[in-house]
Amino acid sequence: MSFVLPHARCGVMGILNVTPDSFSDGGRFVRLPQAIAQGLRLIEEGADILDIGGESTRPGAAPVSVQEEMDRVIPVVEALARETGTPLSIDTSTPEVMRAAVSAGAALINDVRALRMPGALKAAAAAGVPICLMHMQGEPRTMQASPRYGPDIVDEVTGFLTERIAACEAAGIDRARLWIDPGFGFGKDLSHNLALLAQLDRLSRLGFPLVVGLSRKSMLGQMLDGNDVSERLPASLAGALWAAAHGAAVVRVHDVRATAEALRIWHAVASERAARAGA
């Protein structure tokens, strides 16, 4: 399936975790019928992309075997590729899963490790689909233990992404296939996350589609006196709107309908403002 980014507006990437231990919805969609139904529901609610993941990357998460990850995600990708024309993204760092998922119908590789696992660059290059490179300090099991950065986190994140972009190009991956994600909550404390969010426009100026994932994350709970993950929809919407206003091409979210409707209002007002400014 070819992939077309909705350039005229900020796109919505719906999260479909087929894992037992994801921080927000782990265990809800591990069975194939439930996963398919949830994927179709997110599309009906307005998802431009479905991001399917079979390995939790929440802080402290343990890795899973290649076979277990394959068993979780490939049947879901195959089934949804038959059921819908909406582009499917595979959320994985594993080369074998990348190859199998793209063969099954995935149109995007979304890698929190930015193709650093052995064989990942080669697999992604051969896949011929867009790739989202995310910044992460450390590994999921330990990334929140003691994240440290210098005085300019944006500069450090930019340097990491620039190095990974160069590695992709050296592996034969065209720049036009690359997206970037600053990795909110991945090896970053609240101050780091806020500094990145406040300067999101600096990352958007790199010239690659910018993906922002803030949905239900602990940084939002910390800002709201430790509220429960189930109570973070208003904060998630605020984050999505800020991201859209400051250069995000895609927001990755759990609550698709609410996000799509909020963005629809924002885009309408922003378009009207732009039209009046140009009149």
Image (spheres, helix red, strand yellow):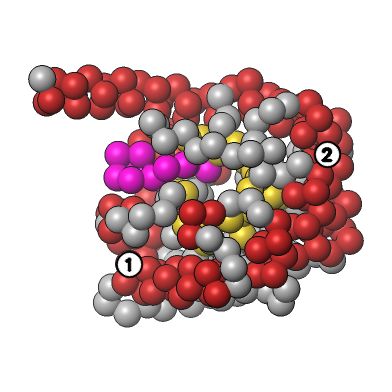
Asked if residue 198 lies in the magenta stretch, the reply is no
Question: Is residue 65 left or right of 168 when viewed as pictured?
Answer: right
Image quadrant holding the C terminus, namely top left
Question: CA gap, disc 1 to disc 2?
Answer: 38 Å
Position in image of residue 178 (x %, y %) = 51, 56
Q: Find disc 2 in the rendering and name its residue.
A: 78
User: At which x and y percent is residue 277?
Assistant: 11, 26
- Identify the residue at image location x=68%, y=74%: 117
Which portion, as a residue range, is magenta? 242-253
Q: Which mark is residue 154?
A: 1
Q: Amino acid at mark 1?
A: Val
Q: Is residue 41 left or right of residue 96?
A: left
Provide residue 58's location: percent of width, then percent of height: 62, 59
Q: Nearer the viewer, residue 174 or 200?
A: 174
User: Which structural element holds mark 1?
Assistant: helix
Between marks 1 and 2 in the image, the one whose residue lies nearer the viewer: 2
Q: Residues within 10 Å of mark 2 (few under 14, many from 20)?
A: some
| Image location of residue 78, percent across then percent down | 83, 39
Choose top left, top right, bottom left or bottom right for residue 9. top left
Q: Is residue 155 above or below residue 195?
A: below
Q: Nearer the viewer, residue 46 or 101?
A: 101
Q: Is residue 116 left or right of residue 99?
A: left
Instruction: Examine the rendering and report whether any part of residue 252 can be seen.
Output: yes
Tell me if mark 1 has few (under 14), some (14-19) or many (20+) residues whose alpha carbon lies within 10 angstroms of its own. many
Q: Nearer the viewer, residue 175 or 231?
A: 175
Whichever of callouts 1 and 2 sits on the residue coming sooner in the sequence is 2
Residue 17 visible, this angle: no
Amino acid at dot 2: Glu
Q: Which type of secondary structure does the marked residue at label 2 adopt?
A: helix
Residue 206: mark in rendering: none
Q: Is residue 235 above or below residue 37?
A: below
Quarter of the figure with the N terminus: top right
